[in-house]
Image (cartoon, grey):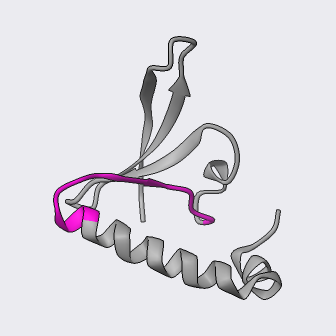
Amino acid sequence: MVTLEEIYEEDPTQRIIDEGAGWGAQQMLKAGVPIFYRDEKFPETMDGDLFVKEYPNGAKFLVRKILTEDFRLLEEHIKLLEG
């Protein structure tokens, strides 16, 4: 698995993009909107259909996002995450 630091070393502009995305995510949380992301602290989210869903109150869940054949996006909460 490639780490973020390895990605940033190969492409320094990616760090700037990620920092901007982080700022945007914080603004979404402040506005009361949950965010989805992948996090190295939760390796299962680094590939496939699993993501971290973070709510404005700080609660984090492992969720599965599924796109159906008729283009509906389904979400399945797998478990509450610590940290």
Q: Quadrant of the C terminus?
A: bottom left
Report the front residue among 71 and 22: 71
Report the front residue among 10 and 61: 10
Q: Is residue 48 left or right of residue 11?
A: left
In percent of width and height, residue 64 lies at 52, 34
In percent of width and height, residue 9 lies at 79, 87
Q: Is residue 68 above or below residue 6?
A: above
Q: Quadrant of the N terminus?
A: bottom right
Residue at 59% in and 57% down: 42
Q: Is residue 61 left or right of residue 47?
A: left
Query: Does 41 lie within the magenta span?
Result: no
Q: How many marks can you see?
A: 0
In percent of width and height, residue 22 lies at 43, 74
In percent of width and height, residue 70 lies at 51, 12
Query: Does 30 lie within the magenta span?
Result: yes
> Which residue is most to the top?
70
Residue at 66% in and 56% down: 43
Q: Bounds of the magenta span?
A: 28-40
Q: Quadrant of residue 4?
A: bottom right
Residue at 76% in and 77% down: 7
Report the front residue among 22 and 50: 22
Q: Quadrant of residue 17?
A: bottom right
Residue at 22% in and 59% down: 56
Q: Is residue 17 above or below residue 12?
A: above
